[in-house]
Structure formats: C-alpha cells, structure tokens
Amino acid sequence: MENMVITCIQCEEDFEVTVEEQQKLKKRGFDAPLRCPQCRKHKSRNLQHEENRKFKSKKKHYRMKFDEDYG
C-alpha cells in the first residue's frame, strides 16, 4: 500500500492520503475521503452551524408555546 493522491470533489485540489490514514479508514470500514481536509472541516463546521440554528429555533418555539400556555 502506498500514499494516494485524490482530487477533492468540492475544491478540485489534489490532496494526499497517507498509508496510516488509509489503514485507519479501512479498519473502521470507511472508504477513501472524497474531500480534502480543509473542505471536510468547512463542511463539518457548516453542518454544526445548521444543527445549532435548528436547535435554537426549536428552543424559541417551545419557549413561546410555554408563555402562551402558562403566561
């Protein structure tokens, strides 16, 4: 097994996946990454932001309902 060079599907930059990373991924049952580390981090951050936004919206909705019922 040797280092792989993969083109990111998002930014189209080449990035390298080392043998150690490949072994970790294979051990966990994952495929090779399709995004470079920077795009993966950015995607992860966006998903977390979206989850936080949804949670705050739900929290606000429940607070308004509580005020209507008991206010």
Image (cartoon, rainbow, N blue to C red):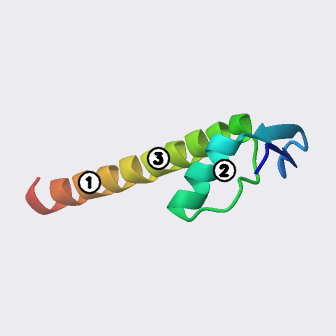
Precedes in sequence: disc 2 or disc 3:
2
Residue 28 or 2: which is nearer the viewer? 2
Percent across and percent down for residue 6 are 85, 48
Callout 1 crowding tier (Cα within 10 Å): few <14, some 14–19, many ≥20: few
- What distance separates the C-alpha of mark 2 from that of mark 3? 34 Å
Q: Label 2 is placed on what type of residue?
A: Gln
58 or 40, nearer to the observer: 40
Residue name at image x 58 percent, y 44 percent: 44
> Horizontal and vertical percent for residue 68?
19, 59
Question: Disc 2 marks which residue?
Answer: 22
Crowd rating for badge 2 (residues with CA inside 10 Å; few <14, some 14–19, many 20+): some
Residue for badge 3: 53
Q: Which of 55 and 62 is in front in this view?
A: 55
The residue where tag 1 is placed is: 64
**Label 1 SS:** helix
Question: Label 1 amino acid?
Answer: Met
User: Which residue is depicted at the point 46% across and 51% down?
Assistant: 51
Q: Residue at x 79, y 46 (%)?
A: 2
How many numbered circles does the render carry? 3
Instruction: Name the kind of residue labelled 3 in the image.
Output: Arg
Location of residue 69 (image quadrant): bottom left
